[in-house]
Image (tube, grey):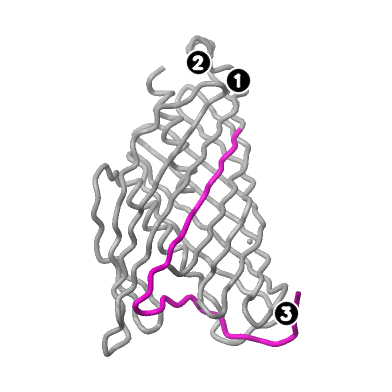
Amino acid sequence: MKKHYQLMIMLIMLLSTIASAQSKKVLIKSRLAPNTNYVTQVDNLTNITMDIDASDDVKKSLASAGMSMPMAMKTEQRMEMNTLVSEADAQGNRKVEVQFTKNEVASSVGDKKLDMPPFGLAKIFYTVNKDEQAQIDSMAGDKLTNEVIESMKNMVMKAYVKFPDYPIGLGDKFEDKMPMNIPVKGFDAAVVLVSRFKVVAVTDTEVKLDVKQTMEMSMTSQEKKADVKMEGDGKGVAVYNIAMDHLTNYDVKLDMDMVFKMEGMNLTMKGDIISKAVSAKK
Protein backbone atom coordinates (compact mmCIF):
# COMPACT_ATOMS: atom_id res chain seq x y z
CA MET A 1 0.00 0.00 0.00
CA LYS A 2 2.85 2.39 0.81
CA LYS A 3 4.20 2.41 -2.74
CA HIS A 4 0.73 3.24 -4.13
CA TYR A 5 0.41 6.14 -1.67
CA GLN A 6 3.87 7.39 -2.68
CA LEU A 7 2.84 7.14 -6.32
CA MET A 8 -0.16 9.39 -5.68
CA ILE A 9 2.03 11.94 -3.87
CA MET A 10 4.47 11.93 -6.80
CA LEU A 11 1.66 12.47 -9.31
CA ILE A 12 0.23 15.34 -7.27
CA MET A 13 3.61 17.05 -7.01
CA LEU A 14 4.15 16.57 -10.73
CA LEU A 15 0.80 18.10 -11.67
CA SER A 16 1.40 20.96 -9.34
CA THR A 17 4.59 21.71 -11.23
CA ILE A 18 2.89 20.34 -14.51
CA ALA A 19 -6.56 35.68 -18.74
CA SER A 20 -12.73 47.22 -25.95
CA ALA A 21 -10.54 46.75 -29.00
CA GLN A 22 -8.67 49.40 -31.04
CA SER A 23 -6.84 49.05 -34.37
CA LYS A 24 -3.43 50.40 -33.31
CA LYS A 25 -0.32 48.23 -33.02
CA VAL A 26 2.10 48.11 -30.07
CA LEU A 27 5.45 46.49 -29.36
CA ILE A 28 5.09 44.26 -26.30
CA LYS A 29 7.87 42.58 -24.32
CA SER A 30 8.55 41.13 -20.90
CA ARG A 31 10.71 43.70 -19.13
CA LEU A 32 11.72 43.91 -15.48
CA ALA A 33 12.10 47.58 -14.63
CA PRO A 34 15.23 48.49 -12.63
CA ASN A 35 14.83 49.25 -8.92
CA THR A 36 11.31 47.74 -8.82
CA ASN A 37 9.45 45.26 -6.63
CA TYR A 38 6.81 43.04 -8.26
CA VAL A 39 4.28 41.08 -6.20
CA THR A 40 2.76 37.94 -7.73
CA GLN A 41 0.15 35.44 -6.58
CA VAL A 42 -0.29 32.10 -8.35
CA ASP A 43 -3.21 29.72 -7.75
CA ASN A 44 -3.38 26.22 -9.23
CA LEU A 45 -6.42 23.97 -8.88
CA THR A 46 -6.15 20.37 -10.13
CA ASN A 47 -9.11 18.01 -10.42
CA ILE A 48 -8.44 14.43 -11.53
CA THR A 49 -10.55 11.31 -11.89
CA MET A 50 -8.37 8.20 -11.72
CA ASP A 51 -9.16 4.58 -12.56
CA ILE A 52 -6.95 1.53 -12.28
CA ASP A 53 -6.45 -1.74 -14.11
CA ALA A 54 -4.62 -3.99 -11.65
CA SER A 55 -4.69 -7.33 -9.89
CA ASP A 56 -7.41 -8.13 -7.37
CA ASP A 57 -4.81 -7.94 -4.59
CA VAL A 58 -3.90 -4.36 -5.50
CA LYS A 59 -7.56 -3.36 -5.76
CA LYS A 60 -8.29 -4.96 -2.38
CA SER A 61 -5.31 -3.14 -0.86
CA LEU A 62 -6.62 0.18 -2.14
CA ALA A 63 -10.17 -0.59 -1.04
CA SER A 64 -8.99 -1.47 2.48
CA ALA A 65 -7.47 2.00 2.67
CA GLY A 66 -10.76 3.57 1.63
CA MET A 67 -9.69 4.21 -1.96
CA SER A 68 -12.39 2.91 -4.27
CA MET A 69 -12.19 3.26 -8.04
CA PRO A 70 -12.82 5.40 -9.95
CA MET A 71 -11.28 7.88 -7.53
CA ALA A 72 -11.43 11.67 -7.45
CA MET A 73 -8.26 13.61 -6.63
CA LYS A 74 -8.09 17.33 -5.88
CA THR A 75 -5.09 19.56 -5.26
CA GLU A 76 -5.09 23.26 -4.41
CA GLN A 77 -1.86 25.25 -4.44
CA ARG A 78 -1.18 28.90 -3.67
CA MET A 79 2.18 30.58 -4.13
CA GLU A 80 3.05 34.17 -3.38
CA MET A 81 6.33 35.81 -4.31
CA ASN A 82 8.16 39.12 -4.35
CA THR A 83 10.47 39.88 -7.28
CA LEU A 84 13.11 42.46 -6.37
CA VAL A 85 14.98 44.04 -9.28
CA SER A 86 18.24 45.95 -8.78
CA GLU A 87 19.52 49.00 -10.59
CA ALA A 88 20.90 48.28 -14.06
CA ASP A 89 24.66 48.29 -14.59
CA ALA A 90 26.45 49.93 -17.51
CA GLN A 91 25.59 46.97 -19.77
CA GLY A 92 21.92 46.97 -18.81
CA ASN A 93 22.17 43.85 -16.61
CA ARG A 94 19.97 43.64 -13.52
CA LYS A 95 20.20 41.32 -10.54
CA VAL A 96 16.88 39.78 -9.59
CA GLU A 97 15.84 38.11 -6.34
CA VAL A 98 12.59 36.14 -6.21
CA GLN A 99 11.35 35.57 -2.66
CA PHE A 100 8.71 32.86 -2.28
CA THR A 101 6.73 34.07 0.74
CA LYS A 102 3.99 31.42 0.56
CA ASN A 103 3.81 27.92 -0.93
CA GLU A 104 0.81 26.01 0.38
CA VAL A 105 -0.57 22.75 -1.00
CA ALA A 106 -3.69 20.85 0.09
CA SER A 107 -4.63 17.53 -1.52
CA SER A 108 -7.33 14.94 -1.12
CA VAL A 109 -8.20 11.57 -2.63
CA GLY A 110 -11.94 10.98 -2.41
CA ASP A 111 -12.87 12.06 1.12
CA LYS A 112 -9.37 11.37 2.47
CA LYS A 113 -6.95 14.25 2.97
CA LEU A 114 -3.34 13.46 2.09
CA ASP A 115 -0.37 14.36 4.25
CA MET A 116 1.72 16.32 1.78
CA PRO A 117 5.47 16.76 2.31
CA PRO A 118 6.33 20.28 3.50
CA PHE A 119 7.14 22.82 0.82
CA GLY A 120 9.95 25.05 2.02
CA LEU A 121 10.15 28.73 1.16
CA ALA A 122 12.93 29.66 -1.20
CA LYS A 123 14.82 32.47 -2.84
CA ILE A 124 15.95 32.40 -6.45
CA PHE A 125 18.73 34.67 -7.67
CA TYR A 126 19.18 35.35 -11.36
CA THR A 127 20.51 37.90 -13.82
CA VAL A 128 18.59 39.56 -16.64
CA ASN A 129 20.54 41.18 -19.50
CA LYS A 130 19.55 44.14 -21.68
CA ASP A 131 17.71 41.75 -24.04
CA GLU A 132 15.63 40.41 -21.11
CA GLN A 133 17.32 37.01 -21.25
CA ALA A 134 17.41 35.40 -17.81
CA GLN A 135 20.13 33.21 -16.32
CA ILE A 136 19.57 31.46 -12.98
CA ASP A 137 22.50 32.14 -10.62
CA SER A 138 21.59 30.27 -7.42
CA MET A 139 18.86 29.22 -4.99
CA ALA A 140 18.56 29.26 -1.23
CA GLY A 141 16.05 27.70 1.15
CA ASP A 142 15.26 24.68 3.28
CA LYS A 143 13.17 21.57 2.57
CA LEU A 144 13.90 21.92 -1.14
CA THR A 145 13.79 18.72 -3.16
CA ASN A 146 15.00 18.66 -6.76
CA GLU A 147 11.36 18.52 -7.89
CA VAL A 148 10.48 21.66 -5.91
CA ILE A 149 13.59 23.52 -7.09
CA GLU A 150 12.90 22.79 -10.76
CA SER A 151 9.22 23.63 -10.34
CA MET A 152 10.17 27.05 -8.96
CA LYS A 153 12.74 27.62 -11.69
CA ASN A 154 10.17 26.69 -14.32
CA MET A 155 7.75 29.18 -12.81
CA VAL A 156 10.31 31.97 -12.98
CA MET A 157 11.25 31.19 -16.57
CA LYS A 158 7.59 30.76 -17.58
CA ALA A 159 7.08 34.45 -16.82
CA TYR A 160 9.31 35.24 -19.81
CA VAL A 161 6.97 34.79 -22.74
CA LYS A 162 8.80 35.19 -26.04
CA PHE A 163 6.87 38.04 -27.62
CA PRO A 164 7.34 39.04 -31.29
CA ASP A 165 10.10 41.57 -31.98
CA TYR A 166 7.72 43.69 -34.07
CA PRO A 167 4.57 45.69 -33.21
CA ILE A 168 1.35 43.65 -33.06
CA GLY A 169 -2.29 44.61 -33.25
CA LEU A 170 -5.83 43.27 -33.21
CA GLY A 171 -6.03 39.76 -34.66
CA ASP A 172 -2.26 39.12 -34.72
CA LYS A 173 -1.01 35.73 -33.47
CA PHE A 174 2.26 34.43 -32.06
CA GLU A 175 3.57 31.28 -30.38
CA ASP A 176 5.78 30.54 -27.38
CA LYS A 177 7.30 27.06 -26.98
CA MET A 178 8.78 26.14 -23.60
CA PRO A 179 10.50 22.82 -22.83
CA MET A 180 10.39 22.17 -19.07
CA ASN A 181 12.70 20.20 -16.85
CA ILE A 182 10.70 18.29 -14.22
CA PRO A 183 13.01 15.85 -12.47
CA VAL A 184 11.35 12.84 -10.89
CA LYS A 185 13.68 10.42 -9.13
CA GLY A 186 14.21 7.29 -11.18
CA PHE A 187 12.52 8.66 -14.31
CA ASP A 188 13.65 10.26 -17.56
CA ALA A 189 11.15 13.05 -18.21
CA ALA A 190 10.44 15.32 -21.16
CA VAL A 191 7.76 18.03 -21.09
CA VAL A 192 6.92 20.61 -23.76
CA LEU A 193 4.35 23.37 -23.27
CA VAL A 194 3.28 25.36 -26.34
CA SER A 195 1.24 28.56 -25.88
CA ARG A 196 -0.45 30.24 -28.82
CA PHE A 197 -1.56 33.84 -28.31
CA LYS A 198 -4.03 35.98 -30.28
CA VAL A 199 -4.54 39.71 -29.73
CA VAL A 200 -8.25 40.35 -29.11
CA ALA A 201 -8.11 43.94 -27.83
CA VAL A 202 -5.66 46.85 -27.60
CA THR A 203 -6.22 49.95 -25.46
CA ASP A 204 -3.98 52.77 -24.27
CA THR A 205 -3.13 50.77 -21.15
CA GLU A 206 -3.24 47.07 -21.99
CA VAL A 207 -3.25 44.30 -24.57
CA LYS A 208 -5.74 41.46 -24.09
CA LEU A 209 -4.77 38.03 -25.41
CA ASP A 210 -6.62 34.79 -26.00
CA VAL A 211 -4.43 31.84 -25.03
CA LYS A 212 -4.47 28.29 -26.38
CA GLN A 213 -2.07 25.68 -25.02
CA THR A 214 -0.96 22.17 -25.79
CA MET A 215 1.19 20.04 -23.49
CA GLU A 216 2.96 16.76 -24.04
CA MET A 217 4.77 14.83 -21.32
CA SER A 218 6.67 11.56 -21.48
CA MET A 219 8.35 9.78 -18.55
CA THR A 220 10.05 6.41 -18.56
CA SER A 221 11.91 4.35 -15.98
CA GLN A 222 13.78 1.16 -16.78
CA GLU A 223 14.40 0.57 -13.08
CA LYS A 224 10.73 0.89 -12.11
CA LYS A 225 9.49 -0.62 -15.37
CA ALA A 226 7.14 2.33 -15.69
CA ASP A 227 5.95 4.56 -18.47
CA VAL A 228 3.91 7.77 -18.26
CA LYS A 229 2.25 9.66 -21.10
CA MET A 230 0.24 12.85 -20.77
CA GLU A 231 -1.44 15.12 -23.30
CA GLY A 232 -3.32 18.32 -22.62
CA ASP A 233 -5.20 21.08 -24.40
CA GLY A 234 -6.08 24.34 -22.76
CA LYS A 235 -7.42 27.81 -23.30
CA GLY A 236 -7.78 31.04 -21.39
CA VAL A 237 -6.89 34.70 -21.33
CA ALA A 238 -3.93 36.91 -20.49
CA VAL A 239 -3.53 40.67 -20.02
CA TYR A 240 -0.35 42.61 -20.83
CA ASN A 241 0.07 45.94 -19.05
CA ILE A 242 1.75 48.41 -21.41
CA ALA A 243 3.07 50.73 -18.68
CA MET A 244 4.54 47.81 -16.72
CA ASP A 245 5.93 45.94 -19.77
CA HIS A 246 4.58 42.86 -18.05
CA LEU A 247 1.86 40.17 -18.13
CA THR A 248 -0.26 41.13 -15.12
CA ASN A 249 -3.10 38.60 -15.44
CA TYR A 250 -3.09 35.01 -16.61
CA ASP A 251 -6.01 32.55 -16.41
CA VAL A 252 -5.85 29.22 -18.29
CA LYS A 253 -7.65 25.89 -17.92
CA LEU A 254 -5.75 22.85 -19.24
CA ASP A 255 -7.74 19.64 -19.87
CA MET A 256 -5.56 16.53 -19.81
CA ASP A 257 -5.43 12.79 -20.28
CA MET A 258 -2.74 10.68 -18.61
CA VAL A 259 -1.77 7.01 -18.70
CA PHE A 260 0.62 5.63 -16.06
CA LYS A 261 1.80 2.10 -16.77
CA MET A 262 3.71 0.34 -14.02
CA GLU A 263 4.50 -3.29 -13.40
CA GLY A 264 1.31 -4.85 -12.12
CA MET A 265 -1.05 -1.96 -12.82
CA ASN A 266 -2.18 0.72 -15.26
CA LEU A 267 -3.56 4.07 -14.12
CA THR A 268 -5.71 6.22 -16.38
CA MET A 269 -6.40 9.80 -15.41
CA LYS A 270 -8.62 12.53 -16.81
CA GLY A 271 -8.95 16.00 -15.41
CA ASP A 272 -7.97 19.61 -15.61
CA ILE A 273 -5.61 22.18 -14.16
CA ILE A 274 -6.78 25.76 -13.67
CA SER A 275 -3.88 28.22 -13.34
CA LYS A 276 -4.34 31.83 -12.36
CA ALA A 277 -1.66 34.45 -11.79
CA VAL A 278 -1.88 38.13 -10.87
CA SER A 279 1.11 40.46 -10.78
CA ALA A 280 1.55 44.10 -9.78
CA LYS A 281 4.21 46.63 -8.84
CA LYS A 282 4.55 47.24 -5.13
Are circles 1 and 2 on residues that touch, CB within 8 Å?
yes
243 relative position to 49: left or right: left
CA gap between label 3 and label 2 equals 53 Å
Q: Residue furthest front?
A: 282
Q: Amino acid at mark 2?
A: Leu
Query: How many numbered discs?
Result: 3
Q: Which residue is mark 3?
A: 170
Which dot, 3 or 2, sits closer to the camera?
3
Residue 259: x, y in percent? 56, 36
* Rendered image: mark on residue 144: none
Q: The N terminus appears in which quarter of the rendering?
A: top left
244 relative position to 83: left or right: right
Q: Which residue is mark 2?
A: 62
The part of the image, by quadrant, that contains residue 171 is bottom right
75 relative position to 212: left or right: left
Q: Amino acid at mark 1?
A: Met
* Rendered image: mark on residue 69: 1
Q: Is residue 31 highlighted in magenta? A: yes
The residue sitting at 51% across, 21% down in the picture is 112
CA gap between label 1 and label 3 equals 48 Å
The residue sitting at 42% across, 64% down in the picture is 157
Q: The C terminus appears in which quarter of the rendering?
A: bottom left
Which of 54/116 is in front?
A: 116
Q: Say few, some or many: other residues with alpha carbon within 10 Å of mark 3 (under 14 / 14 to 19 / 20 or more).
A: some
Residue 278: x, y in percent? 53, 60
Q: Which residues are magenta?
A: 20-48
For marks 1 and 2, the one nearer the N-term is 2
Q: Is residue 261 highlighted in magenta? A: no
For marks 1 and 3, the one nearer the N-term is 1
Q: Say few, some or many: other residues with alpha carbon within 10 Å of mark 2 (under 14 / 14 to 19 / 20 or more).
A: some
Q: Amino acid at mark 3?
A: Leu
